[in-house]
Amino acid sequence: MTDLEVGLRRAVRGDVRFDVTSRALATMDASNYRRVPFGVVAPRDADDVAGVLEVCRAHGVPVVARGGGTSIAGQATGTGVVLDFTRYMNRLVSLDPEARTAVVQPGLVLDRLQEAAAPHGLRFGPDPSTHSRCTLGGMIGNNSCGSHSVAWGTTADSVRELDVITARGRRLRLGRDWSGAPDGLRELVDGELARLRTGFPELPRRISGYALDALLPERGADVARSYCGSEGTLGVLTEAVVRLVEAPRARALAVLGYADESAAAEAAAGLLPLRPLTVEGMAADLVPSTAALPRGGAWLFVETGGESAEEARARADTVVRAADGVDALVVTDPAGQRALWRIREDASGTATRMPDGTEAWPGWEDCAVPPARLGAYLRDFRALLGAHGLRGTPYGHFGDGCIHVRIDFDLLTEPGIARFRRFSEELAELVVAHGGSLSGEHGDGQARAELLPRMYGQEMVGLFERVKGVWDPDDLLNPGMLVRPAPLDADLRFSVLPREPVDVAFGYPLDGGDFSAAVRRCVGVAKCRTTSVSGSGVMCPSFRATGAEEHSTRGRARLLHEMLAGEVVTDGWRSTEVRDALDLCLSCKGCRSDCPVEVDMATYKAEFLHHHYAGRRRPAAHYTMGRLPVWLRAVTRTHLARPLNALARLRPFARAAKRLGGIAPEREIPRVATRTFSRWWERRRASVQAGDLVVLWPDTFTEYLSPSVGQAAVRVLEAAGLRVALPPTVRLEKPPVGDGRTVALDPLSLLRGRGHVCCGLTYVSTGQLDHARAVMRRTLDLMEPVLETDAPVVVLEPSCAAALRTDVPELLHDDPRAARLAAKVLTFAETLERHAPDWTPPRVDRPVAGQSHCHQHAVLGDAADRRLRRAALLTGELSGGCCGLAGNFGFEKGHYEVSTACAEEQLLPSVRDAPDGTVVLADGFSCRTQLEQLAGVRGRHLAEVLAAALEGDG
């Protein structure tokens, strides 16, 4: 333990962490930069902050304040001690509806303030797209803005007073009329009044540099406002008094279509006199699907407000009439508005990939020019990109002249980095020529501070340095930012990654087979750090359960990045730090769909476990639950289901079995079916001999644990006029398919375990990828005759369907049969919709509760399920999130607490609050098991509900 760490532990009541994991998690923010800190401190209060500053000053160690870590210019990284305010100093201290003010701590997430203000008809004006995870401290440090800045301004416009501790320990209360100014600041400003009155461009989004013009006497000598945007270089914020604004009672959203982004940009300024709440712009290449949008190649999102829905709609109609576009759409439904806004908010992640999959990076994320010049600036910007052979898609706050863009810089090679520098220098000149600011929202950080002399001139930048000296004479706070900056092409986070592809098992088709590129997907926008999930969203249940960064998708990606770098995490695939962070990953796959850049942590976890345990003994749960199909098949073959079920009810036996199997002692061992689904199938007589052929997949859970689901599915599919068959059970040149009872012809093949298809899910989730590949190849061998037909493969268990759609082709990327099988996979609802479109389901006419399966949400989609439920008069929506059992996860020893916390987030409350007569839907075996064990409720697969209704027992 170093003297610094010892000193901090003595001075601080909060957490002092110098371990590998904590340091690795803080090496990066959402920028292109990386710095390795000595350690991380989570202070409990202002006294802790003062203690940290005193100890670090004595040791000459820099201090960097950090909130949500979503800064895009590098200002939330540092080489000294990082202050993490999100752990403890995250409270809303008070809210005064009469005065329309709130007192907040720096680690408070913006959405928590909005939630507290909403019942009073109030809100905090600025709202960056990261509102669900960015903190008030970070917003003040960067002077953040958001989409509503045309109405409510920047964060500086919403700040009243700030409590700040200087690097030398002075506690100041910053406000107007020089309140809280450090010694020497007023005298310095008084000597530079002429420069301050003429040296700053007038535009709504000038964020670059220090806001020294706020100290002019005619502007109220507002020290608090001048502090905003200082990026933690002047003092450390411990509390803030912020102003709230009245929220409109109703809103409408006008989406205006234009031929291209320049046309949209030129139209934006003309809409400002109508006093809209937003004027946001984006182009078609950032939109996954334009189906929900009006015609056009680019759009303006113009929000209007009013005292009533009619007033808001009327204002939106006025906007449409004033707009000179090619098409328009007005949306008044709140859910419809949220869906459209999600398209815009996800652009910060979507933009990190070009349409062809090429990586794109921040660095010139948010320049701003006068709104009237935006169209001309965009044309010049596009020309500059072309001159350098670069591509990028601008979007952002068109009404304020602020443009976000990610550019396909090559930041991996020396020529590419040199081009990054040349482009940055020329773009800075272009922005200044248009009267703009190098930063219009996210701050200068390391990305732009070096170029501030081009905007302000050397004398003004010299004045910035003198101001920094007044506040922080020892240059202790966030050195290298804003003044005396580090070079914009130094400390790039990619430089430490291996240059040659890493040998891996999965194919990573979207990343060119490169695991490093897959890990680079995480750019730090931190959507995974949201503390609540909306709608049907899933990501990231483990973070919401623990609140710890290492249990977020971003945190795990950071650790994998550092594992590849080898500087902080030094033992590669054998790393216990990475293993422990991944241990609480539920492999729910939520990040695959909910992360704007489609980070797939479930796959990364499987990859890591494959390498981590190569040649070593695995945890017991990997041998029991990871090889579940083998054990269940053996139990069935030896006719031991009944005695084992009986023994499982005996407490001493169950306790011993769970201890040996690595199963959580709180869990009950599920009952094994005494008659498998396949055995039931063999003894029944098919009722349909005509109609479309469908091949019903006997997944492990349906086969051995829930055969009633398979039986119900057969009844419904046949009632819909479909001819059902099971997959072949032995490999022949041309085995029969579709005869209704294809069975094994070689008993020896069954004894060898070769007679059953399997998606390999349990092997993949525990990282037994060699076994998974063997199982998958045997399955493809068996399925070859099915692949030659037009028959779809109907999979009832969503996790198995997701594995067949994604894991099989990505793990067997060298076998073309895998992709052919994946293309055939349909869910139960998709099968009925596509192959029995004229069939009318029975009327159930009851409300539903439950949860959409996380794998279905992430991989398969549930649109067909929603339509089928509506047709059967099953009313209501299923909740989002994850049930928390997630296959083997919730059964493993040490996971029970997190598993139940995930269930308590949405699933269990939705069931408890459901009215009498509600149908509890749960298509996944894990979801049904979690409901039964934690709530004593029987969840049913949709097939079971429809089958019961067909038989008059709904």
Image (tube, rainbow, N blue to C red):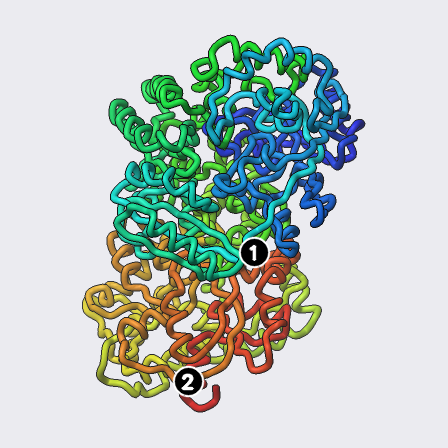
Q: Position of residue 660 (x, y in %)?
A: 62, 59
Tell me: residue 857, above or below residue 352. Answer: below
- Of all residues shown, which one is farthest toward the bottom? 952
> Which amino acid type is shown beneath numbered disc 2?
Arg
> Which amino acid type is shown beneath numbered disc 1?
Ala
Residue topped by disc 2: 843
Tell me: residue 422, above or below residue 332. Answer: above
Residue visible at 39% across and 40% down in the picture: 504
Pick the front one: 86 or 188: 188
Image quadrant where one finds the N terminus: top right
Dot label at residue 931: none
> In the image, which is nearer the foreground, mark 1 or mark 2?
2
Tell me: residue 41, above or below residue 938. Answer: above
- Looking at the image, residue 870 sits to the left or right of residue 41; the answer is left
Pick the front one: 825 or 662: 825
Sequence-earlier tag: 1 or 2: 1
* Structural crowding at the residue carrying mark 2, measured as other residues with C-alpha within 10 Å and reported as few (<14), some (14–19) or many (≥20): some
Can residue 678 be seen here? The reply is: no
Residue visible at 67% across and 63% down in the picture: 666
Could you tell me how far apart the alpha carbons at marks 1 and 2 are, in whole angstroms?
43 Å
Can residue 344 be seen here? The reply is: yes
Q: Position of residue 18 (x, y in %)?
A: 66, 29
Dot label at residue 621: 1
